[in-house]
Amino acid sequence: MEVFRNIYAKVLAKKLGYAPAVVILGARQVGKTTMARQYAQETGLAFQYFDLENPEDRSKFDDNPVTFLNFYKDQLVILDEIQAMPELYNALRSIIDQDRRAGRFILLGSASPQLVTGVSESLAGRISFMDLSQLTLSEIGDDYDQQAHWIKGGFPIPFLSTSADQSFDWMESFVRTYVERDLNILFDKNFNPVLSRRLWNMLANQQGSLLNTQNLSKSLGVTAPVVARYLEYMEGAFLIHRLLPWHYNTSKRLVKSPKIYVRDTGILHYFHKIRSYDELHVHPIIGPSWESYVYEQILFHKPQNTELYFYRTYNQAEIDLLLIENNKPIMAIEIKLSNSPSVSRGFYTSCEDLEIEQRYVVTPHADAYPKSNGVMVMNIKDFLKKLTAING
C-alpha cells in the first residue's frame, strides 16, 4: 500500500509547507494514519502520534492540553480521530496563534461535516483540508487490474488481498464494526445496528437510483426523519453519497431528488454477495455498479473549483454527470458499460438545452473516437488523464 498514496503525499507536503495544520478526512481503514506516519518517516521529521479514541492517549490531554502539546512544539504532532475530542480545537487555536509556523499538526478525521464545521469555526485561517479517498484507478497504475479494482473496491486491505474469501471477510468485519460501533463513536449517537445495516443493504439495492426517503421509511418501519438522520450520518462517515440534480431557469420539469450511491464498489458487491467479475457480469447491479465506479474516479480527478451533478427531466432526458464551473455546466459525461455505446436522443437534447460543447461517453476499454454532434467516446483511464491535464 505504501506506493499508492504518492499522489496524496505530494498534496499533503504542499499544504504542510504553508499551513500550521492540515486536516485529512476520509473513511476508516482508507489509509489516513499510514499516510501521515509514512510522510513523517520519509521526510525524516521527528513526530508524535496520538490516537484520540485510545483512552490512554486521551488521558494525556486531561490536565492541560495546551501545556501538553507545547511540550512537542519542535515536532510534528499527528492527532488521529480528532472528532473524538472537539475540546482540543480551542487548545490548538491558542497554540497556533502563539506560533504560526507551517507544518506543526496533522489532524486525521473519519467524520464530516460535523468535524469540518467544528474545526472550521475554531481554526479558521489556521488549517487546510484534504480528502483521502479509497485507492483510485490512477493510483494503482498499470501493475494492477482495472477490473479487479472495480470488483474489490478501493479500500487497501481487500484490494490487495489474494483471495475473494479474504476480501469478503474484511468487508463483513468492516460493515459489522461500522453498524455496531463506529457510527455511535463517530457521532456520539445511539444508532440501532439492525436498522443501520438494513438501510445500508437497501441503499446497495437501489444503487444509482433516485432517493425516496418516504419509501425507505415504509420498508424499514420507521419515520422519514429517522431515515433522513441515518442517511446524514452515513454520508458524514463517507459510506454513501448523494449526487444532487442540476437546476436552472427553464420551462422544463426537472427531477429534484438526488441519486444515492454506496461509495465503494467493493462494499456494494459485498451486499450483493458478488465475489468475481463472472458473478457481476450476470447480475442486474452491473450497470449501476459501473456508473458509481466511474463517478468515484471522476470525483477525485475533477478540476479544482468544479462540482459534479446529474441532470434529468421528467421526460427522461438525462445526463449522467455534469461538470459545473462558476455555476455553469461546462462538460456532459455519459457513462456506458459497452465499449461500442449508443447515445440516447435525450443526452443530445439535454446538451443542446444546457449549451454544453464538451460531450463525452466514458466506457471501460474503448479506444477514443468521435460520434455525431460533438460527442467523444473514451475509456475511463484516458478520460481521467484528460481531467488530470485540465488540473495541470
Image (cartoon, helix red, strand yellow):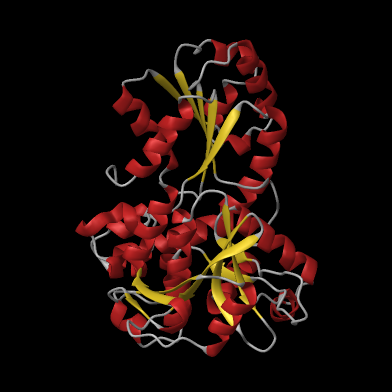
Q: Position of residue 233 (x, y in %)?
A: 66, 56
Question: In screen coordinates, is 213 left or right of 348?
Answer: right
Q: Quadrant of residue 219?
A: bottom right
> Which one is in front, 349 or 271?
349
Please provide percent x and percent y for residue 191. Answer: 68, 58
Residue 208 visible (yes or no):
no
Question: Which residue occupies the foreground of this view, 258 or 252?
Answer: 252
Using residue 353 as the reference point, say whether residue 104 is left or right of it: left
Whether residue 277 is visible to the viewer of this picture, yes or no, is yes
Q: Nearer the viewer, residue 240 or 196?
A: 240
Q: Give the total of numbered labels.
A: 0
Query: For this rendering, which residue is in front, 327 or 145?
Result: 327
Residue 183 in the image: above or below residue 31: below
Residue positioned 66% across, 74% down in the render: 211
Single out the residue that lies furthest toward the left. 143
Give the x, y percent position of residue 123: 66, 28
Q: Is residue 169 above or below residue 278?
A: above
* 91 with respect to 35 (left or right): right
Q: Residue at x 70, y 86 (%)?
A: 314
Q: Is residue 90 left or right of residue 371?
A: right
Q: Residue at x 72, y 33 (%)?
A: 121
- Seen in the picture, residue 69 relative to 369 is either above or below; the reply is above
- Choose top left, top right, bottom left or bottom right for residue 319: bottom right
Residue 131 rendering spot, x and y as whole percentages: 51, 45
- Which residue does the image show at 55% across and 45% down from the upper left? 110
As displayed, is residue 283 above or below residue 110? below
